[in-house]
Image (spheres, grey):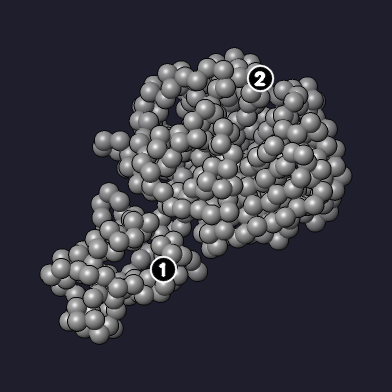
């Protein structure tokens, strides 16, 4: 029988939850790396026992941990993230230029074909790559050449939070950066260009044609249709049908189109999920009701999913990297909250249950579907 | 041998006890001790000093013989009580966070 393994990064350690394909009984392991901020854990698609983890601390900096046995044991690997050449500067809050400074790794994206190759998204925003299983990391500096001097951090930091590797064209990579936007490479990461046409950020960017500066919170793709991208922007849920050349809004009947995560059903490329949050001033669900919204039409028409989720006095947030889907026949959907719950649905979102609660604030959730 | 006491999170990271002992060739400076520490426990690279600049990380402090050495030049000789092993060099995560 198939199994699932849920990798949960929190503000104070990592947790690993496992269950069989029924997803009814969960075993919780952890905390791993207790006391450290675990921004993200992700397994190799081609060698699932190989898992990489980003471990950070305001005191002791960045570590990358690697497991070769599904998270039972770990070893620290390379943690030297040096910007290529002279780091240069980016826009600062007061309009002056500010030097690039490495702070942490927000997101790790293992290669679709090689377990030793991993991409890492950094704050201050940059893309790094290892081809030796994490021992050494080199920046792909062409990304910061895409008008990097105009990027400016938002309140949450200037982090590169999303990396999507095209499963059909191995040369194509998408990344998204908080308060900078979406960028695409068609040559394996050497050169990049901004792909933000159609995004409107009237209250943040006066220039309606601004190429960069859009506060993209998350993008998602279904592997069967790599040219279709979905986006949760700061405000607005967006969609592109041409690999980011043009975006259009699909917020439709959502109660609010502010939020952080967005994900796609494993078997239905037009079924997508978001978690509406009241506003950028009040980072909690509207009316104290935690509701996942599902569209089966690729956007615009949304239904609230509430069974098993708290419908009163709920004031948690769901962060951008804290939602994932498994690929079992009945698609599982998972998300973690800043209140320390991880909710799971084994029926595509119809019903939910907390598979663990009272963890530290959840930063990230990933799921591995195992044979 | 030079004795070095590590903060909790660095002990778990390097899989060592609270105190480690290092062989350091004279002159026994802070730089020489940290070089030896990182060579012996590579997982500690970048955790005490920045990878690129080799500057002390902001919330890491150095104490020995009841003295704060955090702002001393890394090439200053450590106190005799550290060099002769009577006292450890303390590496401390600063109290911070409110």
Q: Nearer the viewer, residue A334 or A194?
A: A334
Q: Is residue A179 left or right of residue A335?
A: left
User: Does the rendering let one see residue A316?
Assistant: no
Chain of the residue that carries numbered disc 1 in the rendered image = B
Q: Is residue B40 left or right of residue A108?
A: left
Q: Which residue is mark 1?
A: B16
Q: In percent of the image, x 42 and y 42: which residue is there? A: A134
Chain of the residue that carries numbered disc 2 in the rendered image = A
Task: Give percent across and percent down for residue A73.
Answer: 54, 54
Task: Give percent across and percent down for residue A8.
Answer: 63, 50
Task: Give percent across and percent down for residue A2.
Answer: 74, 38
Task: Give percent across and percent down for residue A344.
Answer: 76, 45
Q: Which residue is mark 2?
A: A224
Q: In percent of the image, x 37 and y 71: which residue is there? A: B6
- Local crowd at mark 1 within 10 Å, few (<14), some, or many (≥20)? few
Q: In percent of the image, x 20 and y 69: which residue is there? A: B24
Q: Say whether marks 1 and 2 touch (CB < 8 Å).
A: no
Q: In percent of the image, x 59 and y 39: which residue is there? A: A48
User: Does the rendering let one see residue A342?
Assistant: yes
């Amino acid at each position: 029988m198939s199994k699932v393994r849920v990798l949960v990064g929190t503000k104070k350690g990592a947790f690993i939850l496992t269950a069989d394909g029924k997803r009814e009984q969960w075993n919780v392991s952890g905390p791993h790396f207790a006391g450290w901020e675990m921004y993200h854990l992700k397994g190799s698609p081609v060698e699932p026992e190989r898992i990489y983890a980003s471990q950070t601390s305001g005191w002791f900096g960045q570590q990358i941990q690697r497991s070769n046995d599904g998270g039972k044991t770990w070893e620290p690997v390379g943690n030297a993230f040096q910007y290529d050449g002279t780091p240069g500067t980016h826009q600062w809050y007061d309009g002056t230029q500010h030097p690039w400074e490495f702070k942490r790794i927000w997101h790790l994206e293992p290669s679709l074909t090689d377990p030793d190759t991993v991409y890492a998204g950094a704050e201050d925003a940059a893309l790094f790559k290892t081809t030796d299983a994490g021992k050494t990391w080199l920046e792909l500096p062409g990304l910061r050449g895409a008008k990097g001097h105009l990027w400016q951090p938002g309140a949450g930091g200037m982090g590169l939070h999303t990396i999507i590797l095209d499963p059909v064209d191995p040369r194509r990579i998408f990344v998204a950066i908080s308060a900078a936007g979406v960028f695409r490479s068609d040559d394996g990461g050497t050169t990049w260009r901004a792909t933000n046409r159609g995004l409107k950020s009237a209250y943040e960017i006066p220039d309606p044609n601004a190429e960069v500066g859009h506060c993209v919170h998350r993008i998602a793709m279904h592997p069967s249709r790599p040219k279709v991208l979905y986006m949760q922007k700061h405000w607005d849920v967006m969609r592109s049908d041409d690999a980011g050349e043009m975006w259009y809004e699909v917020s439709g009947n959502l109660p609010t189109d502010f939020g952080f995560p967005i994900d796609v059903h494993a078997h239905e490329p037009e079924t997508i999920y978001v978690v509406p949050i009241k506003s950028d001033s009040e980072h909690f669900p509207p009316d104290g009701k935690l509701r996942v919204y599902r569209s089966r039409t690729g956007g615009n028409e949304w239904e609230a999913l509430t069974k098993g989720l708290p419908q009163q006095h709920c004031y948690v947030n769901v962060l951008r990297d804290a939602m994932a889907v498994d690929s079992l026949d009945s698609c599982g959907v998972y998300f973690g909250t800043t209140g320390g719950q991880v909710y799971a649905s084994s029926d595509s979102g119809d019903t939910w249950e907390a598979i663990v609660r009272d963890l530290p604030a959840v930063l990230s959730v990933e799921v591995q579907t195992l044979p | 041998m030079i004795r070095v006491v590590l903060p909790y999170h660095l002990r778990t990271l390097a899989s060592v006890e609270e105190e480690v002992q290092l062989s350091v060739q004279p002159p026994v400076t802070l730089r020489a001790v940290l070089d030896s520490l990182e060579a012996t426990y590579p997982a500690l690279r970048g955790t005490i000093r920045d990878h690129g600049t080799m500057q002390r990380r902001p919330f890491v402090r150095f104490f020995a013989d009841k003295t704060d050495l955090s702002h001393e030049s890394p090439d200053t000789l450590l106190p005799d009580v550290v060099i002769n092993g009577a006292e450890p060099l303390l590496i401390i995560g600063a109290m911070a966070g409110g």
